[in-house]
Image (tube, grey):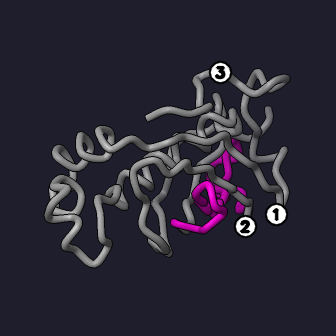
Amino acid sequence: MTGNSTFAYPLGMTSGKYFDDLSVGDTFESGGITLTEGAIIDFALTHDPQPFHVNKVAATESIFGGLIASGFQTIALTFRLFRDTGVLTGTNLGGHGMDEVRWLAPVFPGDTLHARVTVEALTPSRSKPDRGTVRFRYRTYNQNNIEVLSLTMDHVMARRK
């Protein structure tokens, strides 16, 4: 994989957003990451070894007409892209799960993905005042701005002290 996704925080962001810093509708854009054929095959051999993910000949004969990335790889990369924005740095305490997972279009070798993540709901914890749950809507797009993935994920986020 190649791309501008890095471990560095965005300019000016030395720590993540706290629950209290977020509002419904806040949207965060990630950098991009390009999937190589080798990265797709390597991931699939370990995690999702279906023929259209690991075998170029079989993939050509599939409904996709060529090798595609596993949807699970797309989810993992999408989370990584959001993580790399710095929003979650030091304030994400874990998660409750994800819902509404939809793979909307195949991801091919050479595609460059980027994520757009929007705050959909904020729920302060009733029993633990140091945290709250943020429901984020994740949307992932390729270089042609075609949406390839949509899901919601609930993150437990620290509150300001």
Magenta includes 143? yes
**Relative depth, front residue between 50 and 155:** 50
Decide if residue 42 is in sight here: yes
Residue occupying the point 29% across, 59% down: 67
Classify mark 3: helix, strand or loop.
loop
First in sequence: mark 3 vs mark 2: 3
**Relative depth, front residue between 130 and 82:** 82
Give the mark toward the camera: 3 or 2.
Answer: 3
Mark 3 touches mark 2? (CB < 8 Å): no
The stretch of residues the image draws in magenta is 122-148
**Tag on residue 24?**
1
Residue occupying the point 61% across, 34% down: 84
Residue occupying the point 31% across, 46% down: 40
**Relative depth, front residue between 70 and 129:** 70
Mark 1 touches mark 2? (CB < 8 Å): yes
**Residue beneath disc 3:** 8
Amino acid beneath label 1: Val
Amino acid beneath label 3: Ala
**Residue beneath disc 2:** 120
